[in-house]
Amino acid sequence: MFQQIIKASERLSGFSHKTPILTSSTLNNFIGTEVFFKCENFQRIGAFKFRGAFNCISQLSKKEKTQGVIAFSSGNHAQAVALVGKLLGIKTTIVMPNNSPKVKLDATKGYGANIVLYDTETENREVITQKLQDKFGYSLIAPFDDKYVIAGQGTVAYEFLNKVPDLDTLLVPCGGGGLLSGSAIATKHLNPNCQVIGIEPELADDAKQSFKSGKIVTIPVSKTIADGTRTTSLGRLTFPLIQQYVDNITTTSEKAIIDAVKFHLLRMKIVVEPSGALGLAALLSKAVKAQGKIGVIISGGNIDPSTLIEVLKNNQQKTNKY
């Protein structure tokens, strides 16, 4: 699988951004160690999802590309598939919840995708998607449970550790596990001693439960503010990879996530969505012990304006402690 990540990196060359790695002396002084942030909020479409979508779609046959592709997503994967389709001249259809963040819905439409909305309370996205596949012959671009998607997401850590090779710990947000599994594979090949830790919201801890129990655990759709992690379970491909390559999965509170979004904005001057702020949230809340050289993957920056307003409403509460 590591060789697939290298090949994905080659395919993405000239299409994806080599995202920056940032540091914060304020944070380092506060927690007492060095932290490096790989900023996928600066990736195309504002999230790491572009990598996996491009790697996967670029591998389709000419016939499959002609027929078009379909995906289901609450936002970032939707935007990624839509943009890749636009870049490669492929028709895209995206099945999205009717409560998707407006900023992600508008962006997906802006990339030219055909949007099919559904009600999460009464409808099933997989059923809707399958009906459209049967009718039009679309190829499904899975949000995380696909070998090409996983390899594409693994290029985040591949780039990261080629720039900062001596990390002691890597913190990775976890929803369906595509970014976590791909990043863990890359990390363990480049630096076997680096501890890879997945971070989830406490309200969406299916991956942690699965990791601890040794079997895939499915939970109801979560109400966490970190909307990118509202998947109900890990995938059949991502789960065994996580078991093999990831050292631990831990969770962090909604308050810690909000504090992390605020820190990124007010102290580091970058916009990070709640799902992307999970690594910092784990450090600020001490869910992960701050020791050694720590790498954090910021998975995206597509925060809905209304969510950002809510986050900043309580800005006066202990912001100055950092």
Image (spheres, rainbow, N blue to C red):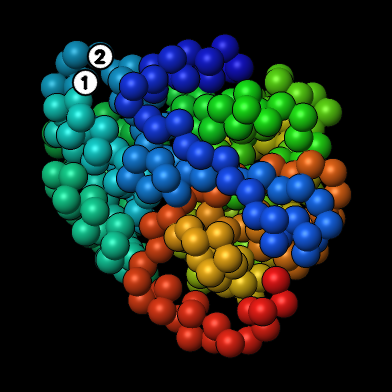
What residue lies at 55% left-to-right and 83% top-to-bottom?
315
Res 17 → quadrant = top left
Residue labelled with disc 2? 61
Q: Quick check: 176 left or right of 23?
A: left
Assign a secondary structure to mark 2.
loop
Q: Nearer the viewer, residue 160 or 273?
A: 160
Q: Nearer the viewer, residue 19 or 240?
A: 19
Q: In the rendering, at what x and y percent does residue 244 appear?
A: 74, 29
Q: In the rendering, at what x and y percent does residue 11 appear?
A: 39, 17
What residue lies at 35% left-to-right and 54% top-to-bottom?
75
- Residue 240 visible in this rendered orientation of the protein: no
What residue lies at 42% left-to-right and 45% top-to-bottom?
42
Q: In the rendering, at what x and y percent does residue 30 appear?
A: 78, 64
Q: Quick check: 46 left or right of 36?
A: left
Q: Label 1: how many residues lie within 10 Å, few (<14), some (14-19) or many (20+)? A: some
Q: Label 2: how many residues lie within 10 Å, few (<14), some (14-19) or many (20+)? A: few
Three-letter residue code for mark 1: Glu
Three-letter residue code for mark 2: Ser
Image height of 282 relative to 194, above or below: below
Image height of 77 relative to 164, above or below: below
Residue 64: assigned label:
1
What residue lies at 30% left-to-right and 57% top-to-bottom?
104
Res 25 → quadrant = bottom right
Which quadrant of the figure contains the C terminus? bottom right
Assign a secondary structure to mark 1.
helix
Gap between marks 2 and 1, in whole Å? 5 Å
Q: Quick check: 96 left or right of 217?
A: left
Image height of 293 relative to 183, above or below: below
Disc 2 to disc 1: CB gap under 8 Å: yes
Q: Nearer the viewer, residue 318 or 46?
A: 318
Which quadrant of the figure contains the N terminus? top right
- Residue 259 visible in this rendered orientation of the protein: yes
